């Protein structure tokens, strides 16, 4: 069993800083939004993402991290 410690007092500044550290031209997750797009709009979306993160932490919901691969046969 993995124990996960989470700081539920995350701030908008911490969220914005985390977004700014993402690598460009990589699209992690199932939404396939490029990190470059997230970084471009980071200051605008950071407050909302912070609220979502705080809500997850408040109810104890931690999405299971999964890797997904799409294979295209040419």
Image (tube, rainbow, N blue to C red):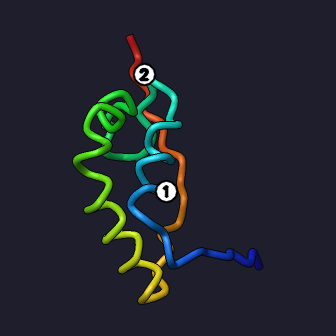
| The quadrant where residue 40 appears | top left
Q: Residue, x 49% and y 86% (percent of image)?
A: 60
Q: Nearer the viewer, residue 72 or 34?
A: 34
Q: Nearer the viewer, residue 30 or 44?
A: 44
Q: Nearer the viewer, residue 25 or 47?
A: 47
Label 2 to label 1: alpha-carbon separation:
22 Å
**Disc ID at residue 14:** 1
Point out the residue furthest to the top here. 74
Vertical placement of residue 13 versus 56, above or below: above
Q: Tag 1 or tag 2, which sits nearer the N-term?
A: 1
Query: CB under 8 Å between callouts 2 and 1?
Result: no
Image quadrant where one finds the C terminus: top left
Q: Secondary structure at mark 1?
A: helix
| The quadrant where residue 56 appears | bottom left
Estimate the x, y position of residue 20 in percent, counting from the top left: 45, 37
| The quadrant where residue 15 appears | bottom left
- Characterize the local packing of mark 2: few (<14), some (14-19) or many (20 or more) Cα atoms within 10 angstroms: few
Q: Residue, x 47% and y 80% (percent of image)?
A: 57
Estimate the x, y position of residue 64 in percent, counting from the top left: 53, 66
């Amino acid at each position: 069993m993995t124990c996960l410690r989470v700081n539920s007092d995350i701030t908008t500044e911490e969220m914005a800083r985390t977004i700014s550290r993402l690598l460009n031209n990589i699209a992690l997750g199932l939404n396939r939004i490029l990190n470059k797009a997230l970084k471009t709009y980071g200051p605008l979306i950071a407050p909302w993402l912070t609220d979502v993160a705080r809500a997850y932490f408040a109810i104890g919901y931690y999405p299971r991290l999964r890797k997904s691969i799409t294979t295209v046969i040419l």
